[in-house]
Image (cartoon, coloured by chain):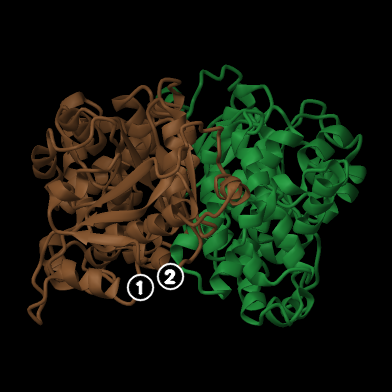
Chain colours: A brown, B green
Amino acid sequence: MAIDGETTQTQAAAPENNNNINENAPNNYKVTVVGSGNWGSVAAKLIASNTLKLYFFHDEVRMWVFEETLANGAKLSEVINQTNENVKYLPGVKLGKNVVADPDLEHAVRDANMLVFVTPHQFMEGICKRLIGKIKNDAEAISLIKGMEVKMEGPCVISTLISEQLGINCCVLMGANIANEIAVEKFSEATVGYRGNKEIADRWVQLFNHPYFMVSAVQDVEGVELCGTLKNVVAIAAGFVDGLEMGNNTKAAIMRIGLREMRAFSKLLFSSVEDSTFFESCGVADIITTCLGGRNRKCAEAFARHGGKRTFDELEAEMLQGQKLQGVSTAKEVYEVLRHRGWLELFPLFSTVHEICSGHLPPSAIVEYSEHTPKFSLVQGSAQFY
Amino acid sequence: MAIDGETTQTQAAAPENNNNINENAPNNYKVTVVGSGNWGSVAAKLIASNTLKLYFFHDEVRMWVFEETLANGAKLSEVINQTNENVKYLPGVKLGKNVVADPDLEHAVRDANMLVFVTPHQFMEGICKRLIGKIKNDAEAISLIKGMEVKMEGPCVISTLISEQLGINCCVLMGANIANEIAVEKFSEATVGYRGNKEIADRWVQLFNHPYFMVSAVQDVEGVELCGTLKNVVAIAAGFVDGLEMGNNTKAAIMRIGLREMRAFSKLLFSSVEDSTFFESCGVADIITTCLGGRNRKCAEAFARHGGKRTFDELEAEMLQGQKLQGVSTAKEVYEVLRHRGWLELFPLFSTVHEICSGHLPPSAIVEYSEHTPKFSLVQGSAQFY
């Protein structure tokens, strides 16, 4: 706590989105960040700066570190605590002295009533299993994890996984958030999606918000979370356009159609999804960031330049040093859902991306909607989607 | 007419967005394009290809040419009719043999019942005056003119100018439409904004639509038309971000905030404006095209690189060969409206763009919203705007 009196407290407690929270006893909220990769470390830095400023947050921020032994033989968690830096995943950036790395998952979460999940999505099921019965009853969660799986019966939303496994409420935070740019405090925005309790959403906003990281909340967990996954399919399409050198009109059109299909698909899966969510940072802004930079766009550009003659697997191996492309697998998963539900013709962009990735259509098919147009118009004309 | 029998007629008359138009007598609609610059010539090419295919349009498309004498002494209109090419404003592209250039404005519009206006906006008032009493009673108009003026009492919308001066209905067509890219048939989209009559809107869609130029219609003339003007202010902001080398997160955030202010400003001026319009090509896609390329973005980038030490007038003169930047003057006009109505604090991006352009703030102010945030939240929290 960085307070010394009533006046200072009031000032400190009046951040941008204050909404008359009345549970703001000093030190009321203890935060643990579950995850310490690139984005997790940046999240810890954002949070740690705010817990010092706002009296109702406990100063210390625990960060669970999946322990690794570094090349010099030292333990990652110990180096973080000595240097105040995640030397492996966010070198050169001080996290804040009040960030405490903890390699013991159960110990790290034991006292926390605000849990921030930011691990690779494939680890979450295992982490949840380990945490059952080990967290506080009044804990609240937020997921920063992008890229849940889209299964035949619908997407496996991480926030729902957390809620169901741990029996707690779970918000999400998504947006146009390249971690390294936020780490050096370049201006950006993010969106918190919440389910019902605005007070809790506002607390998450207070925890993350900075003048250079503007956070706003919308009551639409699924809409916000689906944006984070589906954008990668659109980025593949945008990469094809880049590789074909189609120009800015075409790229803008493809990004727009992609955003529309994200919106329609999300609304078909969850009737609660709001159109307005797609105007938020998690929607239009994240589409822009991901389609301008990003590895999905980059590999798709190379794929189109090679006329589809080299596979994504080859290009991934060559260009991404072992990282995998989420867009290609998400496109396949989305395609399965569309086929299963008879919606293929309603989503020409999503389905074409998969058909190109799997070698059934040439990259140039990404702009050949003419034969799809009558079916496409069904979507345009349907109040159900729009 | 390119038809030879009932079957062919039916096929030709069933384009994508057909909506049971029942006034489709052969040759019913005669089209004149008023304007023959770069975009006007491309529009004539798009239209001329469709009038040949669809039997209810008269084949011939008149194009009014503001007569010029070329360097070799020839008249522009005569060269267009001889070569079928606008050698000055769209060299290398055949317009279609059924395009007839006509330097006589009154003669060009005399028989037309579909008037396509596509001139520089400052000429429209004079053109309207000349056309009073000279057009057919049943004429319909569409404006492709971007960049109407925003006056203190509100924007001077070109479609309203045409409607009021000529006593006819006027739609608009806007979108992510770099003319030269459409001329070479690269895929793009556009949006028709109409006031009430869906049948008329569908006819405009039929006139412009191609597999490589997908047009859809929304019932929101003002929303569509304001997009075409306000995007230039956002492009200035995006250019500042480029010049400051702030990265993709920041650029995406600024584009998103710009789109939001476009939406809020349009809705405050015209309560009929729909949120959904900003998801169309005229909205999000045109923002993307304009903020990726475009002269407003480019000059603003140079302005920021020079730390605001060289004026926009200097940079324009140096970089644009006599063309003027619409964004800078529109930002000033918008600022005057905001100040006049007491809305400055609700639009931090719009007002900051003008304050930077006029030298009252440094370019870096474009991302310094922290002090504006509480006011900004008013916009976020108000159902009136969002």
Q: Is residue B357 above or below residue A32?
A: below
Q: Residue at x 65, y 66 (%)?
A: B365
Which mark, residue A93? 1
Image quarter of residue B76: bottom right
Along the horizontal axis of the image, is B17 left or right of A110?
right
Image quarter for residue B358? bottom right
In percent of width and height, residue B372 lies at: 66, 52
Q: Amino acid at mark 1?
A: Val
Residue B297, visible in the rendered structure? yes
Q: Which mark is residue A184?
A: 2
Please name the residue shown 20% across and 27% down the image.
A167
Q: Residue at x 54, y 71 (%)?
A: B242
- Residue B233 appears left or right of A67: right
Q: Mark 2 or mark 1, which has the lower sequence index? A: 1
For label 1, the SS is: loop
In front of the other: A276 or B46: A276
Residue A215 versus residue A71 in the image, above or below: above
- Element under label 2? loop
Residues at marks 2 and 1 touching, judged by CB atoms closer than 8 Å: yes
Q: Which mark is residue B43?
A: none
Q: Is residue B100 above or below residue B297?
A: above
Q: Residue A380, image x and y in percent?
A: 44, 29
> Disc 1: which chain?
A
| Residue A310 found in image quarter | bottom left
Instruction: Give residue B79's position: percent from left, percent from top.
Output: 69, 66
> How many C-alpha atoms fall within 10 Å of the one at disc 1: few (<14), some, or many (≥20)?
some
